[in-house]
Image (spheres, grey):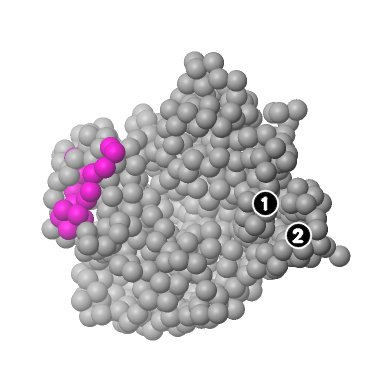
């Protein structure tokens, strides 16, 4: 019986809020709460999604419950006590304002232990690179929904290479394929938010 | 056969004298204004700025001369107001950021705000309100801006708020439909009309770029989450909305009658590229009863056929959409997961008409060669065309970046097949 795990798995933000507070009251450290309850819940809902038993709305609800709990824990955590799997700078590329999928990827990455810098939509190559440098990022993750904007991902990948920045690139979005990712020299590609976490982990392993 | 006869024949799942074709009669079977201009030039038609009837996606109006050149069997009737709620009148020229001069309603153009190489537009063209659409630099569309007012308060949610845009059709609008459908019917082509009001949970409507001050659940993510955590609210909304729609359909049928052949009912997308937004059980619980109510009314009282647009990997949901009473499924996104054309035709082809699926628009049409386009059009017409139940259209709109030589390859291949 783990009320916080259940609240996040079922996507119930108000319950997650009370459950995380109860865990803190029991004297658990924020990092232990994240590692023992929250990340396993996000892993479990991700597996359900992969199996086709739950759908995007369920992931959105779980991600929101996770964020509600994280927002309580984060101010209590000192930077040196925080363990992350890596830092990801994420955004929807220039000319494209679609962000449901991108935000879901950001939430799943955060929910599974990455530090995520979400740059929003309509993001230029200069902003991606600037943010990657500022936050010492390990990965730049890009999204595009439109066939008219997906080519901009190549501009970002090329700019990253030209800059000599030591960062991996990964891409996603409805029209994006593994073949396209390979053709533009991106390091990673995923078809959905859950898979994106696995791809990011693999890129940094 | 006339276009009307051809479309009516294939909708009865019989083969017509040749493949039936639609270009440009709905917001999801159209052509971007940039490509419309290029096609007009290719076919040697009068060069003038293209009328943009749907500014969200910047779809160009297919005038009769181009419809003739493309061999389309359909004539579209669009609503009296565009996607930001501006009346389709007082057309003036406007140069878009990519350099093309198009025709748009003056009230929309006058309210444009140019910023950072892009454009903002406003509900009903009223600049005193926050903008509801944004076309960023290097983009060819207007995307809606979410205007959700604060956090959702579940204790005080009122379904009336999400019904604020639905009401009784007025006489001016009825007269408008009479005029435009009379004109369309005279073309001899099948008339496709989008009367509005019947789309259940279409996020393009939920986000409401035409509404001055949207209330209720208006965020796309919040709406999707509501399908899981607020089912009763959604059912009440759909029940009320479908009642209003049917009352309006009674008046519209009395006014336009069989001028119209096909009614665009709903554009809610249930598929992603590789999955669905809901389970089969949720489709039957939340949507099917209310779709069924509207489709049953249409079938019992009119000669119209009902058109459902639904993007994505929706193979598991197609049976439910057939049970919901739809006659037509669009856009038949063949590049999405499990949407193999032959399988779709074999399993569902005798029960629903595929309106679309004629060429992949995510890869082949924008990025393939003319030879690849030709091969795909040939193959898909062969699969979908057998036994009727197929109206040729691309998978969704033809987008701005599609090379005109690929569109011409598509059109010429169609002409060859139809000769």
- Is residue B401 found left or right of B382 in the rendered image? left
Circles 1, 2 touching at the beta carbon (< 8 Å): yes
Q: Do discs 1 and 2 belong to a common subunit?
A: yes
Q: Position of residue A114 (x, y in %)?
A: 67, 40
Residue at 30% x, 67% y is: B212
Choose between B166 and B228: the one closer to the eye.
B228
Does B288 appear above or below B142? below
Does B390 appear above or below B36? below
Q: Residues within 10 Å of mark 1 (few under 14, many from 20)?
A: few
- Is residue B275 found left or right of B393 in the rendered image? right
Disc 1: host chain: A
Q: Position of residue B227 (x, y in %)?
A: 59, 67
Q: Which residues are magenta?
A: B101-117
Choose between B147 and B12: the one closer to the eye.
B147
Closer to the chain start, of discs 1 and 2, is: 2
B114 drawn magenta? yes
């Amino acid at each position: 019986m783990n009320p916080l795990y259940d609240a996040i798995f079922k996507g119930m933000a108000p319950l997650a809020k009370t459950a995380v507070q109860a865990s803190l009251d029991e004297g658990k450290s924020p990092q232990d709460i994240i590692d023992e309850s929250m990340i396993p819940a996000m892993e479990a809902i991700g597996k359900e999604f992969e199996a086709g038993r739950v759908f995007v709305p369920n992931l959105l609800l779980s991600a929101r419950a996770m964020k509600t709990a994280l927002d309580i824990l984060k101010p209590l955590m000192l930077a040196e006590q925080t363990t992350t799997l890596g830092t990801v700078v994420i955004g929807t590329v220039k000319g494209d304002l679609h962000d449901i999928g991108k935000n879901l990827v950001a939430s799943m990455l955060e929910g599974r232990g990455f530090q995520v810098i979400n740059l929003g939509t309509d993001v230029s190559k200069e902003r991606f690179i600037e943010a990657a440098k500022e936050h010492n990022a390990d990965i730049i993750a890009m999204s595009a929904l439109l066939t008219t904007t997906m080519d901009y991902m190549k501009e970002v990948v090329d700019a990253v290479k030209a800059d000599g920045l030591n960062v991996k690139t990964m891409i996603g979005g409805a029209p994006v394929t593994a073949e396209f990712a390979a053709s533009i020299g991106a390091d990673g590609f995923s078809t959905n938010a859950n898979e994106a976490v696995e791809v990011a982990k693999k890129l940094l392993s | 056969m006339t276009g009307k006869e051809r479309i009516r024949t294939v909708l009865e799942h019989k083969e017509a004298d040749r493949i039936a074709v639609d270009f440009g009669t709905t917001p999801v079977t159209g052509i971007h204004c940039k490509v419309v201009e290029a096609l007009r030039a290719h076919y040697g038609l009068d060069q003038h700025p293209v009328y943009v009837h749907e500014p969200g996606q910047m779809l160009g109006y297919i005038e009769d001369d181009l419809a003739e050149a493309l061999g389309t069997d359909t004539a579209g009737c669009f609503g009296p107001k565009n996607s930001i709620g501006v009346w389709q009148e007082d057309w003036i020229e406007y140069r878009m950021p990519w350099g093309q001069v198009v025709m748009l309603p003056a009230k929309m153009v006058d309210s444009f705000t140019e910023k950072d190489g892009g454009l903002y537009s406003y509900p009903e063209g009223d600049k005193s309100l926050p903008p509801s659409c944004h076309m960023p630099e290097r983009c060819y569309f207007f995307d809606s801006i979410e205007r959700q007012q604060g956090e959702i308060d579940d204790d005080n949610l009122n379904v009336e708020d999400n019904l604020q845009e639905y009401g009784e059709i007025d006489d001016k609008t009825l007269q408008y439909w009479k005029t435009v459908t009379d004109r369309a019917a005279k073309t001899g082509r099948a008339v496709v009309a989008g009367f509005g009001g019947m789309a259940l949970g279409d996020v393009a409507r939920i986000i409401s770029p035409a509404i001055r001050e949207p209330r209720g659940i208006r965020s796309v993510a919040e709406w999707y989450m509501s399908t899981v955590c607020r089912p009763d609210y959604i059912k009440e909304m759909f029940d009320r909305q479908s009642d209003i729609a049917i009352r309006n359909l009674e008046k519209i049928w009395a006014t336009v009658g069989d001028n119209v052949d096909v009614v665009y009912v709903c554009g809610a997308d249930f598929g992603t590229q590789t999955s669905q937004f809901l389970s089969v059980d949720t489709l039957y619980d939340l949507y099917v009863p209310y779709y069924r109510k509207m489709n049953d009314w249409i079938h019992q009282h009119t000669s119209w056929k009902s058109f459902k647009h639904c993007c994505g990997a929706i193979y598991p949901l197609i049976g439910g959409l057939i049970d919901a009473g739809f006659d037509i499924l669009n856009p038949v996104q063949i590049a999405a997961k499990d949407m193999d054309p032959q399988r779709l035709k074999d399993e569902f082809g005798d029960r629903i008409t595929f309106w679309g699926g004629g060429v992949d628009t995510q890869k082949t049409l924008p990025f393939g060669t003319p030879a690849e386009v030709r091969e795909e059009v040939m193959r898909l017409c062969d699969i979908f065309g057998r036994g009727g139940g197929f109206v040729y259209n691309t998978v969704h709109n033809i987008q701005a970046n599609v090379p005109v030589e690929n569109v011409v390859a598509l059109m010429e291949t169609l002409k060859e097949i139809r000769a």
